Amino acid sequence: MEINVKLIIIIVFIGSIFAGGYAILEKNKSVKLSQLHSGYKLQPKDWEVFLQCWQEKRLHQLDQGNADFLRFGNETVKHKSIEFPNLQDIPLPKSFLDFHESYQRLGGAYRETSIADGIGMFAPSEVQLLSSYLLEYLESNNEFSFESDDESYYKYGVEQDTAQQRTSYKQNAIVVGQYGWDDYELIVLYPDSKTQDGEMETAIFGLASDARTPSFVEMMKQLAVFFLSAPDSMPLYPQPTVAKSCAGKLTLVNVWWK
């Protein structure tokens, strides 16, 4: 009898462990980006260190076309202010504003508006809604509307399935740059998907998939690896790889994605 009681206790104990683990998994399924912190505690001076690293590495890679995504020291470009007249008072994430402040301070040149040279970050005056910039893309995307569920969508880092999308987030997307030669290869912010501390989910559009990060700063870290170290592959890169590049200069707190 005593043995049976002990056995029952052991079974109940093991069952509680599995039940607890299952409860945690169920809880994680419902976690949204708005419940998580981006880990961004940096200042414009931190961006300057990152951008200076980018500049130094770029000087050794001018024979590679994609290396000219960020360009520095162009005296013909004069930056008067960091205002975004096309966004109608939409609050922008701190990491995005800190980047522009630092980039301008270092004499950074923005994307040329000609078709021949479309790669680069948009000047503040050119940053605009996707619906205004490339309506055809948005309309085409709407024809095949897709809304991934929370469990599938809110995954970041190398665990992300880049085929997961939310068409609804693209309706108010903000175009901030172009990373490739094709018109659709854009960098966008999603105002409808924010972290607990106000950073916006950021995406780069691909031919059949979108790579997404929890914040603009994480996307710029990913792009640093792409342009300076791994032009033959596409984001997303694992955090150990990111840390070894210039992106390691932008240290985030309590990174929860791999």
Image (tube, rainbow, N blue to C red):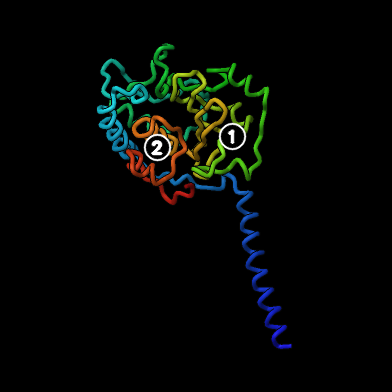
The image quarter in which residue 97 lies:
top left
Q: How many marks?
A: 2
Name the kind of residue labelled 2 in the image: Lys
- Most extreme residue toward the right, as rendered? 1
Q: Is residue 187 above or below residue 20?
A: above
Q: Using residue 83 as the reference point, say whether residue 28 is left or right of it.
A: right
Q: Nearer the viewer, residue 244 or 137?
A: 244
Disc 2 target residue:
221
Give neighbour class at mark 2: few <14, some 14-19, many 20+ (Cα, 10 Å).
many
Residue 257's disc is none
Query: Do we see residue 98 in this rendering?
Result: no
**Residue 175, position as x, y percentages in the image:** 50, 24
Q: Is residue 143 above or below residue 5?
A: above
Name the kind of residue labelled 1 in the image: Ala
Query: Do we see residue 41 in this rendering?
Result: yes
- Most extreme residue toward the bottom, as rendered? 2
